[in-house]
Image: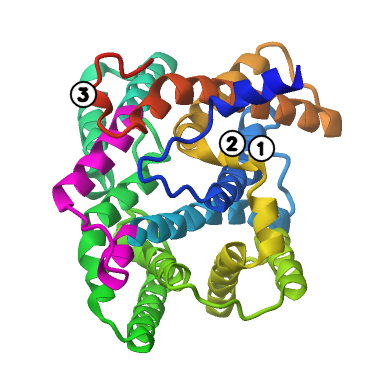
Amino acid sequence: MQNSGNKFLERFRRITSAGNYLPEIDGLRFVAIFWVVVWMHLPTMLDKHLFGGSLFSNHYAFAVMIEGGNGVSLFFMVSGFILSLPFINERLNNGKKVVLSQYYLRRLTRLEPPYLVALIIAFLATMLAKNYSFADMLPHFGASAVYMHNVIYDSASPILGVAWSLEVEVQFYLLAPFLCFVFLIRNSIFRRVLLFLLIILFALYAWKQNFVQPTILPHFLCYFLAGMLLADLYMLKHRPLLNNRLGFVLGILIFVGSPFIISVNLFSLFILKFVLFICAFYLVLFNERLKIIFQNRYLTLIGGMCYSIYLLHTLIISVLFNGLKQWGTLGGVAGIIFYTAIAIAAVLIISAIFYKLVEQPCMRKGWWLRKRPFK
C-alpha cells in the first residue's frame, strides 16, 4: 500500500526539461507558497468572510500576518536564480548556448496556458458572483491576459488579483537575457560587486516607492538580482562560509523568525529582512543539513505545484468560505482550526487536479507538437 501511495504521489512530481532538477529549490517554493497562502491570504479571507473583521484587533498580529506577502519576494528570488543558470553555464562554463527564441517560447508555452485557463475560470466566477456585466469585465480580462493590467489600469486585476506578481515576473522574463550580460564579465569579484551595487540601488528604489501598486519590475528587481547573484555563487562552486551546524541553526532561525520582523515601516528592518532572505537562500543551497530538509519529498511535491496553487487559491478559498457561511459560522479557536484545515485541504486537492490536468502537461518541452500531449 505504501509503495502504491508513493507511486501515486510521484505522478505529481515537477517535470524538468533541462534535466538539472534541484529539489531544494522546490522546497524554497514550498516556503514561499506557505507564507502567501496559509500565513497571509487564508487568515485575511477567513476574517473577512466568516469572522467579520474581528480576528486581528491586535495591530502587531495583523502586521505579522501581512508579512506573509514576502513569500512573493522569495518567488522572485527563485526566478532570478533559475533563469540565470543557463546563461551562467553558457558564458562562464562554456556550456550549451542559450537560444533566445527558444528561451522565450519556453516561457510562453510553460506558463501561459495554465494562466489563461485560471483567468477564464476566475473571469466566469467573478461575473457570476458579483453580477458584473460581460462588457465591463472583458477589457480587464484582455489586459490581464497579456500581463498589462497593472500598467493600463494602475491597479491589480479585479478578476485574478494575484496576477499582479505574474505581470512583474513576465517583465523580468523579457529582461533577464539582457541582465545576464553581466555574466560576460570574467572577473568574478568585479561581477559580483557590480551585482551587489545594483541590488542595493534597486532596494533603495523599492523602499522609496514603498511597494505601492501599480507594481512594475523596478519595484522588485532587487530580489531578482539577488537570485542572480546566488546563481553565480552556486554555479561556480562557491565554498560555504559557515560550518554545517551553525549554518543549519541560522537558516532555521531565519525561516521561522523572519515573518515576525515587521519590515514595512523602517528602512533598517526592510534591509535586514532582505539580507536575511539572501542568507537563508544561500544556506539552503550550500548547507548540507538544511538542504536535506528542503529536499523533503512532500515539501518539494507541494512546492512543485506552487504555480497552480498560487493561481487558484484565492478563488477556491473565497468560494468555500462563502458556501460555508450559508450554514452558519463556528466561532472561537475551534472554528479557526476547522475552517483553516478545510481550506488547506480544498486548495491542495483542487490545485493538484488543475496541476495534473493543465500545468504538468505544459512542463514537457514541445508539448504542443505531441499528438496526445495530455497523456
The image quadrant of residue 146 is top left
Tell whether position 209 is magenta: no
Q: Are the two marked residues, 3 and 1, in contact with CB atoms closer than 8 angstroms?
A: no
**Secondary-structure class at tag 3:** helix
Which residue carries the number 2 mark? 301
Residue appearing at x 71%, y 22% in the figure: 3
Q: Which mark is residue 369?
A: 3
**Res. 131 visible in picture:** no
Report x, y in % for residue 116. Answer: 30, 27
Q: Which secondary structure is most common in the magenta stretch?
A: helix
Looking at the picture, which amino acid does disc 2 mark? Leu
Residue lying at 39% horizontally and 76% vertically, measured from the top left = 199
Where is residue 368, by image quadrant? top left
Amino acid type shown at disc 1: Tyr
Near-viewer residue (356 or 297): 297
Quarter assignment of residue 112: top left
Q: Position of residue 242 (x, y in %)?
A: 67, 79
